[in-house]
Amino acid sequence: MLEEHAKVVQFVSLAGQVTGRKKLQKMVYIAKKMQFPFHEKYHFHIYGPYSEELTLRVEELCTMGFLTEQMEDKGSYVQYCYEVTDKGIDFSKALCEEQQNLNEVVHILNSKSARFLELVSTLLYFGELSREEQIEKVHVVKGKLNFTEQEIKDAFELIDMLSTFKVN
Amino acid sequence: MSYATKKLAEEKVFKDPVHRYIHVRDQVIWDLIGTKEFQRLRRIKQLGTTYLVFHGAEHSRFSHSLGVYEIVRRMVDDVFKGRPEWDEGERLVVLCAALLHDLGHGPFSHAFEHVFDLDHEAFTRAIIKGDTEVNEVLTRVAPDFPQKVSDVIAKTYVNKQVVSMISSQIDADRMDYLQRDAYFTGVSYGHFDMERILRVMRPQEDQVVIKSSGMHAVEDYIMSRYQMYWQVYFHPVSRSAEVILTKILHRAKELSKENYQFLQEPTPFIAFFNNQIELEDYISLDESILLTYFQMWTKEKDPILSDLSRRFINRKLFKYIEFDPANEYQKLRDLEDLFIQVGINPKYYLVHDSISDLPYDFYRPGEEEERVPIQLLMPNGEIKELSRCSQIVDAISGKRRSDHKLYFPEDALLQNGKQKTLRKQILNVLRG
């Protein structure tokens, strides 16, 4: 069980820094959908696939001193920024193995915006449907976000590209 | 009269210890209850291994599902009906979703899901949309009706008010399981005034709100939930049973991969061991099958599988100690080495288990929180978030609580014989 905690620490460590709880949620979800061995349970919530288990785990890891959470005041809202501590690096090295290609995938995902990752993860959530049906679903459940055709096209391209990475 | 609106000639009632009676008038609901997929829920316990601690907790997901249906029925028929914010056209979809919301739970739900990396909600949707008796009933309502019911359960349904009745921080699911689990475990927590909460619920555009006069009943509900989690659901001894159950399944899966010759071929598990699960395999499995195999596995030649199975069947559970991962993760590695030295496989006999819960979460504007807070409807029509009005709820809002334990077979370490000194050393390390 502690390995699952260590994998999250390793994930944040590879990213260097993750800005935003939503972003971290979606990054882990997308990596999981790409068959990387994350076992947090996800369900559909306001911002797309969301894992209560991951939220609780991240908070615990901060309490344990393996991750740091910095709050940034953005005026009308606050944003959280996550980094790994030295203690966290020791912890993840002691408990989990290196994952082939995870580093590349994490960097690609971390370079994208939370809004875009929300779109990608929502499309993946409806992955059993045809592309047309996936797009229709996105418009129903994410109507207020007005995703453009270009964004949807880019999202599918990213999914196709990520799918080429092999997982050990 | 269409099938969707067809009523039974006479109302059917189920006697229920929590709600007294569960009332069924709709032909669709009656037909769904009669399907084999719904009847299977009689053979899945609501609280998994908790019956090994609270012996009364033998109740099933069948009775819980009926209970959730009954609560939603009371909401729509007794409270919401006739209100302009409630669309009567949503009645059947929400009743069906309430009844079927747990349809995909496997045997010993969470442990089983964990070992085979499954998601019961995905199976619920698959049963609703697949080649099943449930799907046949729902399709008779309308071809797109199974999809609608599935969307409500997946929380992707277009009408969020309907979703919130079954899945929110104060929903029919929680209101039933808290009361039902309290009743069957025999504990005195878990009780709250549901009749009062139902009377003060009001449908609004995207959710259901509570009239502020019902705030104290809601406070009681939240405190009940808090108590139930820490006193019943996270009980350390039932967690020990769940740890062993998980390890039995892991061991059987590993042995199968190594082409081990089981005394009795584990046919119902093969699809799960090979990760090639068809819906039919999933529906065929229930807790009686698992327990039968555990009983048979007590006679297996593999010492780990037989020992773990005996422990589960005879309730010879692992002991536990408190564990602080922040400062003791290295100790875990050291203990694993010591276990290997005395010939006990730490993969199966030294288990870290953690649980965590957030009793209630409030909404912080702009933050990426996903829980919809409980909203109070003030006398002037204003909407206020619960923790802003209730001091009790405010005190526990956003406060997560975690617990980590290390489980191990104390009896095996206390045995006389080989390496007695080293075994004693392990016990000393464990006991700090």
Image: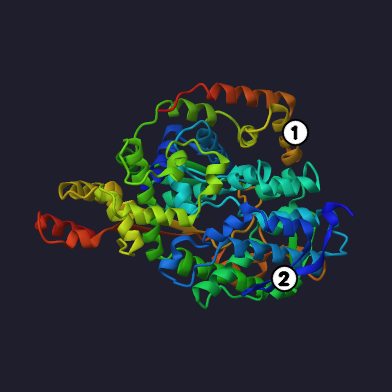
| Residue B2 percent across, percent down from the top left | 87, 52
Q: Amino acid at mark 2?
A: Val
| Rendering coords of residue B424 (x, y %) | 14, 60
In front here: B282 or B374? Answer: B282
For image coordinates 58% across by 55% down, the residue present is B40
Q: Which mark is residue B13?
A: 2
Which residue is tagged 1? Answer: A136
Separation of marks 1 and 2 at Cα, in angstroms: 41 Å
Residue at point 56% right, 73% down?
B190
Q: Is residue B374 left or right of residue B334?
A: right
Q: Secondary structure at mark 1?
A: helix
Position of the C terminus of chain B by quadrant: bottom left
Q: Nearer the viewer, residue B63 or B40?
A: B40
Q: Looking at the image, is mark 1 or mark 2 nearer the viewer?
A: 2
Q: Foreground residue, B285 or A129?
A: B285
The reply, left or right, for residue B430 in relation to residue A25 is left
Q: Chain of mark 2?
A: B
Circle 1 chain:
A
Is the residue B311 above or below the residue A112 in the image? Answer: below
